[in-house]
Amino acid sequence: MTKGKFGLSTAAVAVIAFGFAALRQSEAVLLIAGFALLAEKDEWLNRQAMQALLLTIAYFLTALVTGWVFGGLGRLFGFFEVYRVENAMLRINSAVGDLIYVALIALSVIAVLRVLRGRDAGLPWLSKMAGGDFEAAFARQPKSVPAPVQTSPAMQAAPAQAPYVQPAMSAVQDAQASPAVRICSSCSAPLQEDSRFCTACGAKAE
């Protein structure tokens, strides 16, 4: 364990501070905090002593406010002679005070267990206030905004193309022009190429 300027263990001093806080010894806690801040001047010990002091102050302030509220209501109902409500308010005041004290003891025990391991007490809100950052102690943490999901546009289907049909080749190819057939001018009968007369009617071929 780390020792301070006077040979005292810093963890032991912090444990004593939280022990006096659990016992509601505000003067003793104040003295230890002053010793840590003015004499030891150890940064880690200063944070623990300040948390113990702030825990004690928070306890007494909370108990004072609840006592004013419920105790004042009880006295008010007693003034109007509504004794049942007065007794109920006094019981509530006592129960709330006990719950606050139980919370004080629980936080002190948690702080002592952490300090014995060489860690920071880490009390809610009080740890940040002990470091001097009062704004961060009560500031709301911004909510994490999820990143917008980029949706890719749907791919458009390519238009169906008509299959390419190769044009059919002409059945009749004019490779060579067939020679013209001679016809008889009289009877329209076909004539041979070298015939000079029609074999059907005997007319002279032109």
Image: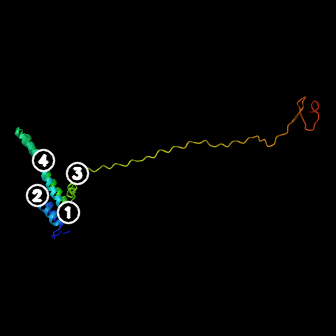
What residue does disc 1 label? 115
**CA distance for labels 2 and 4:** 19 Å
Q: Residue at x 14, y 51 (%)?
A: 100
State if disc 4 and disc 3 touch (CB < 8 Å): no
Q: Amino acid at mark 2?
A: Ser
**Reading the chain from its start, which is encountered first: label 3 or label 4?**
4
Residue type indicated by callout 3: Phe
Name the residue located 16 percent from the left edge and 58 percent from the top edge: 52
Do labels 1 and 2 touch, CB within 8 Å? no
For marks 1 and 2 on the same chain, the one whose residue lies earlier in the sequence: 2
**Real-space Cα distance between discs 1 and 2?**
20 Å
Residue denoted by label 2: 26
Residue 112 visible in the picture: no
- 155 displayed left or right of 162: left
Q: Is residue 31 visible?
A: yes
Q: Quadrant of the N terminus?
A: bottom left
Most distant residue in the bottom direction: 7
**Which residue carries the number 3 mark?**
138
Disc 4 is placed on an element classified as: helix
Give the label, 1 or 2, closer to the camera.
Answer: 2
- Image location (x, y in percent) of residue 32: 13, 62
Q: Earlier in the sequence, mark 2 or mark 4?
A: 2
Along the viewing direction, whichever of 131 and 84 lies nearer the viewer: 131
Q: Is residue 152 above or below residue 44?
A: above
Give the x, y percent position of residue 134: 21, 54
- Quadrant where the image shows the C terminus: top right
- The reply to whether the C-beta atoms of the residues labelled 4 and 1 are less than 8 Å apart is no
Q: Please, which colouring scheme is shown? A: rainbow
Q: Are marks 2 and 3 in contact (CB under 8 Å)?
A: no
Q: Tell which circle, 2 or 3, labels the residue nearer the N-terminal end.
A: 2
